[in-house]
Image: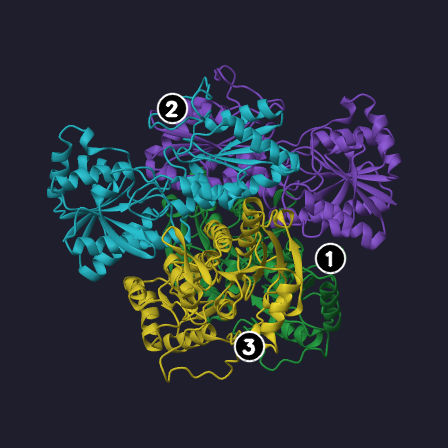
Chain colours: A purple, B green, C cyan, D yellow
Amino acid sequence: MKVGVLTGGGDCPGLNAVIRSAVRKGVQEYSFEFVGVRDGWLGLLKNDVVPLDISSVRGILPRGGTILGSSRTNPFKHENGLERVRETLAANDVDALVVIGGEDTLGAATELSRQGIDLVGVPKTIDNDVSGTDFTFGFDTAVGIATEAIDRLHTTAESHMRALVVEVMGRHSGWIALHAGVAGGANVILIPERPFDIDEVCEQVRRRFEINYAPIVVVAEGAVPKEGQLVVKDRSLDEYGHVRLSGIGEWLAQEISARTEKDARTTVLGHIQRGGTPSPFDRWLATRFGLHAIDAVRQGDFGCMVALRGTDIVRVPLAEATAENKVVAAPLYDEFGVFYG
Amino acid sequence: MKVGVLTGGGDCPGLNAVIRSAVRKGVQEYSFEFVGVRDGWLGLLKNDVVPLDISSVRGILPRGGTILGSSRTNPFKHENGLERVRETLAANDVDALVVIGGEDTLGAATELSRQGIDLVGVPKTIDNDVSGTDFTFGFDTAVGIATEAIDRLHTTAESHMRALVVEVMGRHSGWIALHAGVAGGANVILIPERPFDIDEVCEQVRRRFEINYAPIVVVAEGAVPKEGQLVVKDRSLDEYGHVRLSGIGEWLAQEISARTEKDARTTVLGHIQRGGTPSPFDRWLATRFGLHAIDAVRQGDFGCMVALRGTDIVRVPLAEATAENKVVAAPLYDEFGVFYG
Amino acid sequence: MKVGVLTGGGDCPGLNAVIRSAVRKGVQEYSFEFVGVRDGWLGLLKNDVVPLDISSVRGILPRGGTILGSSRTNPFKHENGLERVRETLAANDVDALVVIGGEDTLGAATELSRQGIDLVGVPKTIDNDVSGTDFTFGFDTAVGIATEAIDRLHTTAESHMRALVVEVMGRHSGWIALHAGVAGGANVILIPERPFDIDEVCEQVRRRFEINYAPIVVVAEGAVPKEGQLVVKDRSLDEYGHVRLSGIGEWLAQEISARTEKDARTTVLGHIQRGGTPSPFDRWLATRFGLHAIDAVRQGDFGCMVALRGTDIVRVPLAEATAENKVVAAPLYDEFGVFYG
Amino acid sequence: MKVGVLTGGGDCPGLNAVIRSAVRKGVQEYSFEFVGVRDGWLGLLKNDVVPLDISSVRGILPRGGTILGSSRTNPFKHENGLERVRETLAANDVDALVVIGGEDTLGAATELSRQGIDLVGVPKTIDNDVSGTDFTFGFDTAVGIATEAIDRLHTTAESHMRALVVEVMGRHSGWIALHAGVAGGANVILIPERPFDIDEVCEQVRRRFEINYAPIVVVAEGAVPKEGQLVVKDRSLDEYGHVRLSGIGEWLAQEISARTEKDARTTVLGHIQRGGTPSPFDRWLATRFGLHAIDAVRQGDFGCMVALRGTDIVRVPLAEATAENKVVAAPLYDEFGVFYG
């Protein structure tokens, strides 16, 4: 059996841990051979693959990023994409794929699986928004980085009695904002799932100042105010739909400043949330995902995605996992109501 | 309603986060009053309680340890213990207790609950060995510290081609050793649940040296070799049954050194595993435990322990949670077999 | 003897360490009394002072920010400023001041000293741009945070073969950019002291891509391209002259992207560089500064600033220290030429 | 010109940073060739050298340990050592050596230089005990690790009102103990340079408990009590003279416990102090040392050691640098007297 491994979408701490454990298990326990596909789906379109053996995965467990490279290429948006994928697999005698990616990459995997390509998915994203799994790897690391930043900002805020807005990642879901906001003791947490009322936010900010504490506002990049409240001139989007630097965080600081007559500043955490060594939890989860994905390959159980349920690794149908994004449910958000404002 | 909060047993990152969220929720949402019991069960025996309000819990979320103090006192091992507990509760008009502790503290809570005292348990221990919950808070922080230590030791081991033994906490269970060992890329992981064969350990160490890598051995303090293999002269135990400094790690390094003729050294992580600021995961979990414990109190659902199941906080009967320690099951340990040796 | 302590300007890790050591030494060794002046010079204008004793400084050594609050107030820009300062000092029987601040705060101190007010200065700034001292405290912490961010960005850059621009603090001097850039292994380091040629920067970026590595560009917020190269529309400045979010980093990423046809992104580190617990070096330096400042007060050696020279703490005349900013000298910048591009 | 690089003695964060910067500068600026000598002086005795070029040093800046391996071999303690060193140099056409090491390695270098071998020394040691330089690299990292451990232990100590003893590295000098002890807010700091009075230590511990704080005692492994006070049974030493696990820290905890009737525990930090990624300061210093060492080689200025003086890198005669260990002077230790006890 020859297995191809690919990593797609934005990079994420733990990708290398999956690659390592999959190769270790496949080679040592089942005598599989492996190839690494370069730059996600792009490598399958361009027949860009490299051999992968135990020596290629030595020492990569604690390293962020992916030794295979990544891209946001979608094979179905390229001419004859499906055919070219088949050709690459055939040309390299690849029997099955382990596809490590987030919603976009796994969405393409779902379709390829329907078209008869044997593959197993592994959910990866710092955003934690893949359905069917309690957590994706990369998320715990991102929350750690964001929480550390919030910890740091508290003392600056207090020293200057100033409101500080921290914009974290999360275009469609507020997982990072909610977890880091709760862990960092934020006073306002704004997520895409719940359009916010800027008047209420300012009221919460004011109440905090009144008891002589400086408010910390954590906002997911995709959070939006209630209809009619957002009047932004320069909210440009990049090619992937990310809000550019003058995003929601900057807008919030300006509004807070104008409405409360208190100094307010913004910090946009940006790419530092996705880099660096994975947290122990993410290394553990990614390692287990790799091991279980290879077991699924071994058993010919294709079209599934490995997933965390409690402390177990289970398999869920890819189609189910990619049907919709996992978002923060209202009761969970409201659970922390006593800390807001 | 007046609620008493106590923290018992070894200190653990996240204790303050539970205290804070319980008080915030109880005061703000249900207008409860609170008292803090000093030094675990000891405070109930000695009527040593302090008022607790929102201002007493400000700023404590990221602080390790417990603002209430702790002890390993067991009320049932003191004369008229139960009676004195009742008296203290009555003298302070305390209607219900939130008891935050590990197996010993919760064991006493189970018995007190049987005797009619209204209380809710919260599982805490860096060892993760409380049944009925996926994880206890404190564990993720301890794993993080141990993993960071292993990360550091790799480069020292490689530079000197030396075997390094890391002794981590875990008298009865190997959770920290297994998680940190897997996350840190250890080559040998030894846990109390699985008596080890010193010949096999040395063989694994040898194989690692043969491919020009330096082995890292992670050992839980309570791990033991197979019957007949352990011959130690000075394995003294302290009052709580902890192995003192010349423990299993030191023994292992000596045996490895003698049998493989390679240099081997030991590092005993000790108390640094339980101190310092809690990890974001532990702050999140501890915060949720505190909120849910107060809901249980509010609903008069006593005799239970809050617990994590997947991403939900549930309640389990205290008697069930404290019936036996949660240990590492054989299949989980074996899951990582490809990395051993 | 009664000593007033004040902290002025932007907050900085280590301020509390100075306050603590000054109070400990003054009280224990010389039986001085202390008051804390609130919010920098503002507290002297408004007669806003608080008692300071040993119990007020317990536990603050590792805490970022300042327990006294800070502001950017300049007493000489307020009507009767000097007179009001004198009145506050007289009203509180303050004999001498310990003034902890950066160039602006120490500049005002220099003038007040000339006007006969007894004071000793302590240099603080994350920017390291105070003359007369090898290092200011706060700088090492800021470099640490920036270096950690660069470490993280490397793996993201490599995974996507993308140029990453990191904008760090430094309006007038490139100390943070240079130290963090060298420590983080950056490929381009741009500082205010050396206007850069955007063509050359792009050439360095290209060369890095050619050998299949992804370039990291570290830029101080105050760095500027050579005359005529900068054409920015929205380079707004805030009230303190800080470049707002769409600053030089964003401009650089756009230019690099447009000129090299490679993806380029920016991360603006912002306020996280000044918060959080001080590094051990900064705690050591700040602690020593506090001890030595009190010795200067004791000896009546006013009008000086404590300073680090090698491993010694010395005193330099305030006038000399504040005459001009300390900038990165050309030979030091050029010392690292082999790493650029 | 062909330059050999070797790293000797205990591993130390920053070794790789020196190797990298020396090779980068030598190759790019002066077209030098390089070989790496394996395992310190051992490689010169055994003719074990490897080619070193720019690609071999890529990515090693943040990595702990040494890619060249290390050993504690002394060429003068091997038969015909000097001759064999000469032969290896001749056989590989090596014109000059860059010798990176601590007192032992540099001591041998001093003698080899006297015998006519062209070399430049670079001071490395986490202990900071090399004369002639303000700091050695590796020290700042070690202090950082020790300080973080002390930070963690504070909360454990407070929660249990227990004395905690932290044993840090430092056989002959107390640099790590003093810097980490001051930065960590320790209450007792014990160093080899100043034999301590156990009665006084216990008095300091008692005073701390009296004001309801828990004492932290930092002790260098080489610290000793006054004559007659130390009665230890099992103080075994390893081959390098290191105190084994039942060392001074353990003895102190037992004495404190017995004399003050308070619980006392020990943590021995051990090898984690020397591993892992170097701190930014150490990367900066190590990088500069490498650059300047190559300049000395280029100028034929042999027999010297590069050294830090203030913010300058200077050269000092090796003989002077290795004449005696740099120890903590009494006035520096006494400077922090207000914090002791």
Q: From the image, which quarter does the C terminus of chain A lie in?
A: top left
Identity, as a three-letter code, of the amino acid under mark 1: Phe
In this orientation, which residue lies closer to the viewer: D147 or B278? D147
Q: Disc 3 on helix, strand or loop? A: loop
In this orientation, which residue lies closer to the viewer: A192 or A95? A95
In this orientation, which residue lies closer to the viewer: B33 or C162? C162
Instruction: Tell me the crowding category of disc 1: few under 14, some 14 to 19, or many 20 or more residues within 10 angstroms, Cα based.
Output: some
Read off the residue under disc 1. Answer: B339
Q: Which mark is residue D238?
A: 3
Q: Which mark is residue C237?
A: 2
Quarter of the rendering containing residue A106: top right
Instruction: Tell me the crowding category of disc 2: few under 14, some 14 to 19, or many 20 or more residues within 10 angstroms, Cα based.
Output: few
Q: CA distance from mark 2 to mark 3?
A: 63 Å
> Is residue A234 depicted above or below C45 in this figure?
above
> Is residue A197 depicted above or below C92 in this figure?
above
Letter of the chain that mark 2 sits on in the rendering:
C
Quarter of the rendering containing residue A120: top right
Q: Disc 1 on helix, strand or loop? A: helix
Q: Disc 2 on helix, strand or loop? A: loop
Q: Is residue D310 left or right of residue A82?
A: left
Whether the residues at callouts 2 and 1 have beta carbons within 8 Å, the answer is no
> Which label lies toward us, 2 or 1?
2
Q: Residue at x 18, y 29 (%)?
A: C78
Q: CA distance from mark 3 to mark 1?
A: 31 Å
